[in-house]
Amino acid sequence: MSELKSAEEKAAEERRGPAGARRGGPPHAQLGMPTEKSQDFVPSAKRVLGLLRPERVVVGGSLVLALSSVVLNAIGPKILGRATDLIFAGVFSRQIPAGVTQEGAVAALRARGQGTVADVLAAMDHVVPGQGIDFGAVGRVLLVVLGIYVVAAGLQLLQGRMLTTAVNRTVFRLRRDVEDKLNRLPLPYFDSQPRGELLSRVTNDIDNVAQSLQQTLSQLVTSLLTVVAMIAMMLYISPLLAVIALVTIPVTMVVTGAIGKRSQGHFVQQWKSTGQVNSVVEETFTGHELVKVFGRQAEADREFAERNDALHHASFRAQFISGIIMPTLMFIGNLNYVAIAVVGGFRVASGSMSLGDVQAFIQYSRQFTQPLTQVASMANLMQSGVASAERVFEVLDAPSRSPTPAPRHASSTLAAGSRSRTSRSPTPRSSRSSSTSTSSSSPARRWPSSGRPGRARRRWSTSSCASTSSTADGSPSTARTSAS
Amino acid sequence: MLLRLVRTHLRPYSGPLLVLLALQLAGTLASLYLPSLNGRIIDEGVAVGDTDFILTAGMWMLGVSLVQVVATITATRIAALTAASLGRDVRSAVFSRVGSFSARELSSFGAPTLISRSTNDVTQVQQVVYMGLAIMVSAPIMMVGGVFMALREDIGLSWLVAVAVPLLGLSVGLVISRMVPHFRAMQKAVDTVNRILREQITGIRVVRAFVREDVERERFGEANRTYTNTALAVGRLMALAFPIVMVVFNASTVAVLWFGAMRVDSGAMKIGALTAFMSYLIQILMSVMMATFMSMMIPRATVSAGRIVEVLDTSSSVRPAEAPVALPAGPVELELRAATFAYPGADSPVLREVSFTARPGTTTAVVGSTGAGKTTLVGLVPRLHDVTGGAVLLGGVDVRDAALEDLWQHIGLVPQRPYLFSGTVASNLRHGDADATDDELWEALRIAQAEDFVREMPGGLDAPIAQGGTNVSGGQRQRLAIARALVRRPAVYLFDDAFSALDVATDARLRAALRPVTREATVVLVAQRVSSIIHADQVVVLEDGAVVGVGSHEELLGSCPTYVEIVESQQAMEEVA
């Protein structure tokens, strides 16, 4: 990397004239780079969830709705199974000549050596020899199923609407808080990092948090509940096979955890790189005419190419590694399926389990892998969201400017960075506000007549009165206006 | 737009893309084959208690799913790499295209939108390309394959496919088509929110100086509310889409059972085929749903692609000379010959037939009220924009015939808004001349009256400068920008209102120090203060883009009423100050 850089630097120098020996290092390298923080996923994720706290009633309500719709959806296949049974029974009934009883038919099958079929027939209800499928009964069952599904869909719709409301309100608040924070950050904070970087945090990262919250919450909740419902159904049918199926869970956890851990790093890197590309673009486009006239284009191009490559790499890694999870889990699901089929097959052969039960079980276990996969992929999305949220939290957690900045002389602006908070003192609130009001009133009266030289003084005196207004309005109650 | 952009930029990756297609085909075929293998394990293995068959078919199934997983993961890798590469290429294309823009194109787009076009919009496109390659490609394969398999199970029920697929497509499509306008609104709302935040961050000092926090907070709150309401509308439609899909899915299953039961009763269909048909129908519907949901991303990405293509299709109005003529070394004369400049589509030109000559060793002051075209005039010399009529000559050479690098090497520009780049004092000054020694930098700082405060800065020449130079005062920024131009030792100095933030005493000291350095140079300065103008060898008075007077201070006082007006208003201002 450094070799490449120096080669390109040389090229840039040659383009400008005789290559001199000395030259300032790349300025961006030392300045304003955010330090790589150790990422604490769990506390940060908790904090993200904590943002939802004001919406807990809505979120709670949508949870209840989700639970009901999942239960209905889980019951559906079971009742649908009864329709299948009726069709089965009808097919068999037709084959039995009228007048022969069900028991007689079973005995006849056994006599012909068709034991398995005889078992199936013996276990059947609704067998009316000589009659075909009882369409009246099938129709009734199907109508009930349809009704259940429609109700479940209705509940799901309601749940989705409630959740989206909660999430959007939460993001609204987060965005408002960040904007509010910007007004309370000390000026050196803005100078200490490239603008594009900070901008990326308050725009790109918040958008990503919003998207992740929206998608994870709505799908995570239903998927998790579905997994629970499926586990209950499986345990009900066969505890032994359920144990085999449940082995999938820790395996899934381990795989997702292993992949997720790696992708988390890549996501952090991806958002960081986005911020860095943003800052080069910002600076180059804003200072466009100077970039041109002072022949800085080559340098800007080099810097951009470098960061663009870094972003390319990071976004490829992040996307690929998060893309691995789905197929891997599908594979685990297939492994699980084979295991259940083999063990189930043995148990049917030994007569300790009915074919219908194995079939139902397999259906449930497949329905169980799908939401599990979804939970896993949501976990991944969540990581990207939390990585962004951490960057937003860093802004929110930056120390606010001191309430009473000492009035400064215009020419000392530069030193602001080194001595910004020296003036912080535990002044009681009353004396503080009185001091700022006196300092702000006298120059304010001079405003209309003051010419250019007065500008700098104006800036500093008013910034102290600005701080009082922001501390007064900083409380969420005044600035809060409800969404819709 | 989207298609054109994507097609052009995917071309270099056609090799990997073919491999991706093959892999997706293999993966999809494997997942189409798996259900029938499942069925056979149940029918021929579990149902008859044939454990040997279960084991062999199970192994076979594992093999197939291994193929599936390897194919899918490799395809995902190619998709991710290709999408990321496309993103990088497009970003780079936009960046270098903007780099070639003249000030005219840049200002007609505006820097903020160009920034979001080269970052956010590219990300949108990149995302949709990834989704397309990783997931959408397999949807048509899956659909065709599923239809084929379903028809193989039972032709009689095929009309159910013909009903269910359009039903699903239509209902989801209806929801999505209602979402599209909201998406456009959302993109706009995002832009507004981001623009306001950007303005607040870049203008934080102004916001605080004028105690505009409350106003800004209200303005932002408004945008935030609009954004949230749009997002809510989209979210609610989205919440509608999933239940609809579920109802169509489940209703299809119920319908298959009902109509299938009739066919089974009449003996036209086997019960096993019924189950298989059902699972294939679900698979088909799945792929339809996937395709429809993916297509939801397309409108948003299309808007983004349009914004990107617009930039890429704009070419700079300043074209580099094809056969550049070298500018003479040493002192050069600057001549404007009936120079006219108009923005495309504008009724009246910004500059109208401006003519004057600035000779080496002389100072030409350009004065005029706000909007008279002073800054535009200055920008003509380094070709930040080109004349639309007449010519600008440097040393007798039309600037349009000179190589841009050569031209810029001759010019030291101090713009009206003295922008500094993030880095250090030294790195900023060396933009003037990369090879300047520290002594030369100090010399330039001394002339620019910036030596004292730079010495006081922690690190001196190596003191950090924030982006835009926001960590130094306006006056200091101007002096550093002047020093940057001095470091270059150019033949032509262009000072665009460059002394405005300096107090009168510093202004006077600076001009005195400049005199020996610029003895051989051609100096053009846009000025407000009478004190700056009085000493100029020549004053050009602009009014509404036209020259209304050229001459010395004294001459103009007698002959040019516009000039007298300007001088009087300036003097009044200075007295008040």
Image (cartoon, rainbow, N blue to C red):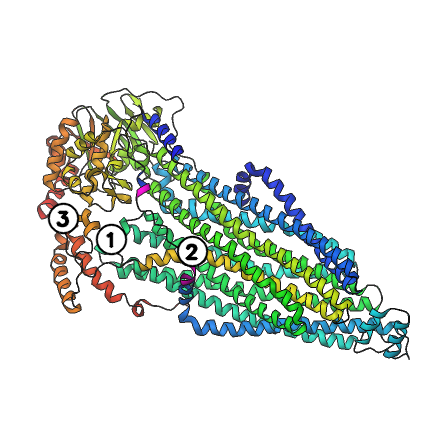
**Marks 1 and 2: same chain?**
yes
The answer to which of marks 3 and 1 sits earlier in the sequence is 1
Q: Which mark is residue A451?
A: 3
Location of residue A405 by image quarter? bottom left
Q: Is residue A256 left or right of residue A2?
A: right
Q: What's the chain of the residue with tag 3?
A: A
Q: How many marks?
A: 3
Q: Amino acid at mark 1?
A: Leu
The answer to which of marks 2 and 3 sits earlier in the sequence is 2
Location of residue A79 by image quarter? bottom right
The reply to whether residue B562 is visible in this rendering is: yes
* Mark 3 to mark 1 CA distance (whole Å): 25 Å
Q: What's the chain of the residue with tag 1?
A: A
Magenta region: A29-44
Q: Amino acid at mark 3?
A: Gly
**Image marks 3 and 1: residues in contact by CB distance under 8 Å:** no
Give how far across and how far down residue A74 sits, in percent: 63, 71
Which residue position holds label 2? A387
Q: Amino acid at mark 2?
A: Ala
Q: Is residue A59 above or below residue B453?
A: below
Give how far across and how far down residue A147 sits, in percent: 65, 74
